[in-house]
Image: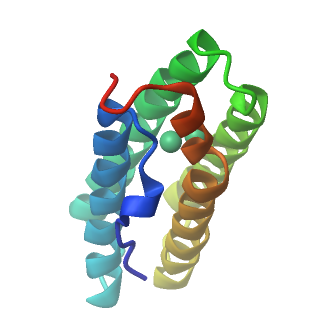
């Protein structure tokens, strides 16, 4: 599965939109490796690490933005971020003990669609709380 960026995903905060695009690109890099049947390699491990780091930095930044602007979705946003992080941590723990292409592909599919839905149904509510192009 490849994640495709659409204008409809815009939050109105340039930095957050850039971070979302960066996350999509990391997911797509991982997707390409999976399509080639690669799962037990330093490249996959490094991508998963980066994904975790970038996601955590993004979540912290976005939660700050929502809370400063008193966005009505701030609490739901934080809840879904925590669930996503749990999904990531559970997968990382299991994958570090036993690697398989199926489990990696499964995580990629679930985490990718969860992220996309989250952006569409939660993050974009920031649009109503900011002026265009704000950081
Ligand atoms: Fe979010
Ligand atoms: Fe986000």
Q: Is residue 117 left or right of residue 37?
A: right
In the image, residue 109 sits, relative to residue 72, either above or below, namely: below
Tell me where residue 43 appears, x and y as whole percent.
Answer: 22, 61
Tell me where residue 3 appears, x and y as whole percent.
Answer: 39, 72
Dividing the picture into quadrants, the one containing residue 66 is top right
| Residue beneath the point at 41% across and 49% down | 10
Q: Is residue 20 left or right of residue 114?
A: left
In the image, residue 44 sits, relative to residue 64, either above or below, namely: below
| Residue beneath the point at 33% across and 41% down | 19
| Residue beneath the point at 51% across and 20% down | 65
Tell me where residue 79 appears, x and y as whole percent.
Answer: 76, 35
**Quarter holding the N terminus?**
bottom left
Q: Nearer the viewer, residue 100 or 15?
A: 15
Tell me where residue 78 appears, x and y as whole percent.
Answer: 70, 31
Q: Nearer the viewer, residue 7 or 100?
A: 7
Dividing the picture into quadrants, the one containing residue 18 is top left
């Amino acid at each position: 599965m490849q994640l495709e960026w659409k204008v409809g995903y815009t939050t109105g905060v340039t930095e957050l939109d850039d971070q979302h695009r960066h996350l999509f690109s990391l997911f797509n890099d991982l997707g390409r490796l999976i399509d080639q049947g690669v799962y037990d390699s330093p490249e996959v491990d490094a991508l998963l690490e980066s994904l975790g780091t970038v996601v955590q930095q993004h979540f912290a930044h976005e939660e700050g933005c929502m809370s400063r602007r008193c966005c009505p979705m701030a609490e739901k946003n934080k809840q879904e971020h925590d669930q996503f992080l749990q999904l990531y941590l559970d997968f990382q723990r299991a994958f570090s003990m036993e690697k398989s292409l199926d489990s990696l592909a499964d995580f990629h599919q679930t985490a990718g669609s969860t992220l996309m839905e989250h952006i569409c149904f939660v993050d974009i509510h920031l649009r109503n709380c900011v002026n265009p192009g704000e950081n």
